[in-house]
Image (spheres, rainbow, N blue to C red):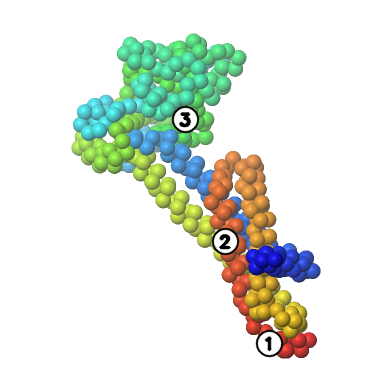
Amino acid sequence: MNQAKLNQNRIVTSVLLGIKSLMLHKLRSGLTMLGMIFGVCSVIAMLAIGEGASHEAQERIKRLGSTNIIINSVKPPEQQDSGSSGETFASAYGLTYDDASRLQYTIPNVESVLPMRIMRDNVRFSQNQEPCQVIGTHPQYASLQKVELVSGRFLAAIDEKHQRNVCVITSGLARRLFTYQDPIESTIRIQDVYYQVVGIINETGTAEQRPQKGEMEGEALDNNVYIPLSTARSRFGETIVRSNSGGFSAETVELHRIIVKMANTEAVIAAEQQISSLIRRFHEQNDFELIVPLQLLREAEATKRMFSIVLGSIAAISLIVGGIGIMNIMLATVTERTREIGLRRALGAKKQDIVSQFLIETVVLSIGGGLVGVVLGIMVPLLVSISTDMITIITPWSVILAFGISGLTGIAFGIYPASQAAELDPIEALRHE
């Protein structure tokens, strides 16, 4: 029998002897493994939950468009409380059609400029009525916002040119308004004007994208009606009048939002300051805000890295605590088995045999606990996803990392007890009571 075969048999014998020793105290071994089980489980579960939350946030930002710059009209702070106490008040602020034209022809590397006008109103079909956002925009909205067409078509250039009373509604609004009828070619009413439904889309926007999100709080996200911008301008005008207790308020806003699509991501960073300066030059009030999805995306990625480090550190601490628990138990085991160690040394066992014996027992404890922890760590995020709407993502690297750290922890915290056992004097060990 060659040396390699002898070494292999020796390792197998040591492993079996280690398992046999651990099985003599099943409860104690099981309790010792708990620290490692919970440590590995928490590493995988926490990283999966963090990864899922980060992925969801990044997807929301990506839907805004990484090459887009979004400019919203914002009511100036000095006008925020005006017209709310029974007085009559009129204000004018926000983006204009001239702003859209200047952006198109002044800022370099601009691919397209999409103006939008957004009003809140009620839409009616037969006896059904729903609150909605009426969004006046151009046909390129479909490509710019990656609209998912369910049926029919989106707005066309000819609709914009002839100020047609046509509309595209979101699928959620279609379900709520049209209980039994096919919405396509049907007619809906907003104020006193009738619009023919030419298409149905899935809403891809988020609550954060609502320019009037404060006013639409609590209402369905996909209650949107898209009409040509020219139609919106002619049918609704540019002044919104709201009555309140004892008076009324009027707001004149030409455009609520302008989306500027840049040629590439490099142009986005350069254009941000240029766009801000250009608009500010023609606005006396601070009545607009810039949202740069690319910048938000990079901030989200940086936050994700920091979040992963924090979660990983917290979970790693629990693994270290588990390793300390294993070391304590192994030190107690060395004390209990002092006579056994002395006997083995007296029969010819070397120090390295004693070290390998206790080290193998430690590794068996940590790897056994690690395997159970991996199973639980995979199950916990799945249960979280099933029981809640939270997205969890288990990455292979988190499983490998957690299991690898559990094995290394076992070796690291097993070296000291094993060396203590190997350093025992055989004669003193045999005299131990």
Q: Residues within 10 Å of mark 3 (few under 14, many from 20)?
A: some
Q: Which residue is mark 1?
A: 425
> Is residue 349 rendered to the left or right of residue 227?
right
Residue closest to the eye, 30 or 367: 367
Residue at the disc numbered 3 = 204
Asked whether, in this view, residue 118 is left or right of residue 186, the answer is left
Query: In the image, residue 333 lies at what x, y percent?
Result: 72, 76
> Which of marks 2 and 1 precedes in the sequence?
2
| Residue 194 seen in render | yes
- The Cα–Cα distance between marks 3 and 1, rounded to whole angstroms, is 74 Å
Give x and y (percent) for residue 34: 68, 62
Neighbour tally class for label 2: few under 14, some 14-19, many 20 plus, Cα within 10 Å: many
Q: Secondary structure at mark 2?
A: helix
- The first of marks 2 and 3 along the sequence is 3
Q: How far apart are labels 2 and 3 at the CA level?
A: 41 Å
**Three-letter residue code for mark 1:** Asp
Residue beneath label 2, please? Answer: 405
Residue at 39%, 48% (x, y): give it. Answer: 299
Query: Hey, what amino acid is under mark 3?
Result: Thr
